[in-house]
């Protein structure tokens, strides 16, 4: 049987976080919450006699993305009319870029399948978004609040071969866009949509067979599942002697399968021609240099710094930089005095556990009641012996739910660690006296039972005993019993 591999390219549509739309002054609003058709004007609803004007901020955001993706920024740009006809496209065409896009020939490195791969970026071009259709039975409702919102379409080369690689690329690109501050990354609201182009071929071949495009996926999970399904479906088609048709597919989440939507358009079908109402856009080198100066530290650079300057391993650093909000929280915590490795452990361990339990996404870590300063102070209480690690987890739970000062919480609830030798020695003696069988087993050579006895001591101290001192006292008592000196 022939072994097949996937050939995958991604088209990503990212709404840009500008205040106004791409070609008019209408405010950009959340299309999932704003009242329908309340942020429109004659330009974005295509009334006769109106003229578009290019949004300078959208262009600058596009330049920044192009630079972050290692693209060449084209000095000469032309907007074009892309003709297609849907009810939520008021003009009957979309203003986009075709022959002269904003950015070209870039790349992004991803880690997948145990190695690093460089994925080519063919182009990134500016365009406008469509309106929003809500289908209800036999009719549809149209909301044009989203019509005209700036979009950056990013197109990769067909360099991806597995759903795992596509997922790694999608996560990396979303992270870059969020770091740049040009997109929120919230795929559930449709501000970032991904469309895989998928074909299969015999493994090792350079052949490019007919591809399908899965439209408007609104989660990275859906990207992975749709690609896996489509690869399997196409392999079955070829193996059965059929041929894959070039069509647009939709992803049916409920049934876990792709479904045909319509035949795939070609460039000729769109009848591209230069937008007559917009002059060519000339981007001078000084503008590119100014945009480059605004670039923040991006995920790869931040990860390298966390490893080289803070001593983190590759895994911890990668987890922390995957979401900008998490990376910021980590740096604010270390800035408040917490040792980097300890901060990484607490954030990726206990803090993430509490967030998962509460259903809080990682990009929302900055919205929780726990502050970086409080986490650092909590670690300080453990370090100086004011509380033990178990109590610290209890305090963390309170901080996560309510916020506040960890020292005040410990004091108010009487959770301070007991380091008094006399009190701990009394607890040790009480446990040994109450468990003669366990003591006898220990003296008979079953030394592992000492751990159980230690647990009983901590229980006697209600979890507040200093474990190091308690262990020293218990070990000394057991050693004395072994030597007949107790």
Image: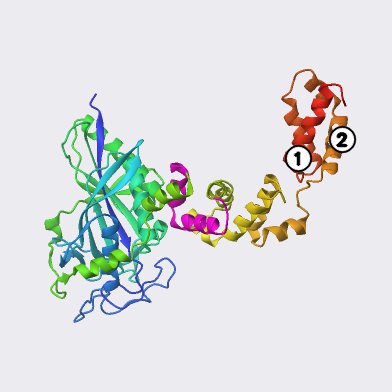
- Looking at the image, is 345 positioned above or below residue 75? above
Residue 365 shown in magenta: no
Residue 205, x across and y down, in percent:
18, 33
Give the alpha-carbon distance from disc 2 to disc 1, as whole Å.
16 Å
Q: Which mark is residue 19?
A: none
In percent of the image, x 42 and y 71: which residue is there?
A: 34
- Looking at the image, is 456 positioned above or below residue 41? above
Residue labelled with disc 1? 469
The N terminus - image quarter:
top left
Dot 1, how many residues are within 10 Å of its Cα: few (below 14), some (14-19), or many (20+)? some
- Looking at the image, is 354 positioned above or below residue 481? below
- Looking at the image, is 164 positioned above or below residue 204? below
The C terminus - image quarter:
top right
In the image, the segment drawn in magenta is 313-339
Residue 156, x across and y down, in percent:
24, 50
Residue lying furthest top: 444
| Residue 54 occupies quadrant | bottom left
Residue 288, x across and y down, in percent:
24, 66
Residue lying furthest bottom: 49
SS under mark 2: helix
The answer to whether residue 174 of the structure is visible from this angle is yes
Question: Which of pointers 2 and 1 lies earlier in the amino acid sequence?
Answer: 2
In percent of the image, x 57 and y 51: which residue is there?
A: 351
The answer to whether residue 190 of the structure is visible from this angle is no
Residue 321 shown in magenta: yes
Dot 2, how many residues are within 10 Å of its Cα: few (below 14), some (14-19), or many (20+)? some
Foreground: 477 or 249? 477
Residue labelled with disc 2? 430
Count of number-bearing discs = 2
SS under mark 1: helix
């Amino acid at each position: 049987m022939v072994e097949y591999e996937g050939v995958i390219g991604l088209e990503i549509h990212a709404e840009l976080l500008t205040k106004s739309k791409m070609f008019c002054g209408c405010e950009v609003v959340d299309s999932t919450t704003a009242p329908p058709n309340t942020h429109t004007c004659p330009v974005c609803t295509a009334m006769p006699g109106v003229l578009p004007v290019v949004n300078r901020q959208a262009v600058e955001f596009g330049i920044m993305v192009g630079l972050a993706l290692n693209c060449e920024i084209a000095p000469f740009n032309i907007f074009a009319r892309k003709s297609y006809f849907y009810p939520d496209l008021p003009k009957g065409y979309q203003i986009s870029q075709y022959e002269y896009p904003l950015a070209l020939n870039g790349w992004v490195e991803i880690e997948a399948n145990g190695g690093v791969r460089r994925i080519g970026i063919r182009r990134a071009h500016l365009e406008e978004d469509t309106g929003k259709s809500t289908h209800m039975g036999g009719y549809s409702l149209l909301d044009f609040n989203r019509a005209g919102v700036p979009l950056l379409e990013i197109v990769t080369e067909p360099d991806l071969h597995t759903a795992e690689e596509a997922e790694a690329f999608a996560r990396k690109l979303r992270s870059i866009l969020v770091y740049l501050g040009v997109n929120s990354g919230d795929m559930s609201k449709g501000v970032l949509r991904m469309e895989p182009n998928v074909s299969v071929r015999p493994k090792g071949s350079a052949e490019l067979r007919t591809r399908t495009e899965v439209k408007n996926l609104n989660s990275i999970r859906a990207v992975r599942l749709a690609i896996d399904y489509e690869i399997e479906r196409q392999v079955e088609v070829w193996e059965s002697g059929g041929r894959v048709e070039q069509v647009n597919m939709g992803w049916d989440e409920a049934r876990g399968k792709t479904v045909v939507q319509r035949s795939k358009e070609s460039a000729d079908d769109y009848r591209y021609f230069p937008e007559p109402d917009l002059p060519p856009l000339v981007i001078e080198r000084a503008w590119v240099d100014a945009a480059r100066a605004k670039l923040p530290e991006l995920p790869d650079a931040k990860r390298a710094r966390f490893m080289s300057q803070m001593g983190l391993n590759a895994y911890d650093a990668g987890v922390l930089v995957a979401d900008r909000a998490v990376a910021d929280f980590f740096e604010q915590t270390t800035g408040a005095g917490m040792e980097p490795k300890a901060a990484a452990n607490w954030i990726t361990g206990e803090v993430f556990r509490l967030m998962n339990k509460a259903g809080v996404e990682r990009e929302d870590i900055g919205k929780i009641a726990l502050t970086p300063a409080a986490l650092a102070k909590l670690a300080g209480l453990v370090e100086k012996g004011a509380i033990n690690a178990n109590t610290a987890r209890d305090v963390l739970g309170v901080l996560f739910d309510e916020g506040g000062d960890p020292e005040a919480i410990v004091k108010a609830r009487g959770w301070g660690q007991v380091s008094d030798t006399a009190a701990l020695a009394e607890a040790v003696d009480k446990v040994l006296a109450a468990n003669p069988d366990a003591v006898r087993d220990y003296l008979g050579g079953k030394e592992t039972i000492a751990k159980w006895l230690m647990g009983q001591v901590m229980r006697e101290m209600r979890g507040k005993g200093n474990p190091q001192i308690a262990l020293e006292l218990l070990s000394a008592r057991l050693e004395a019993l072994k030597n007949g000196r107790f």
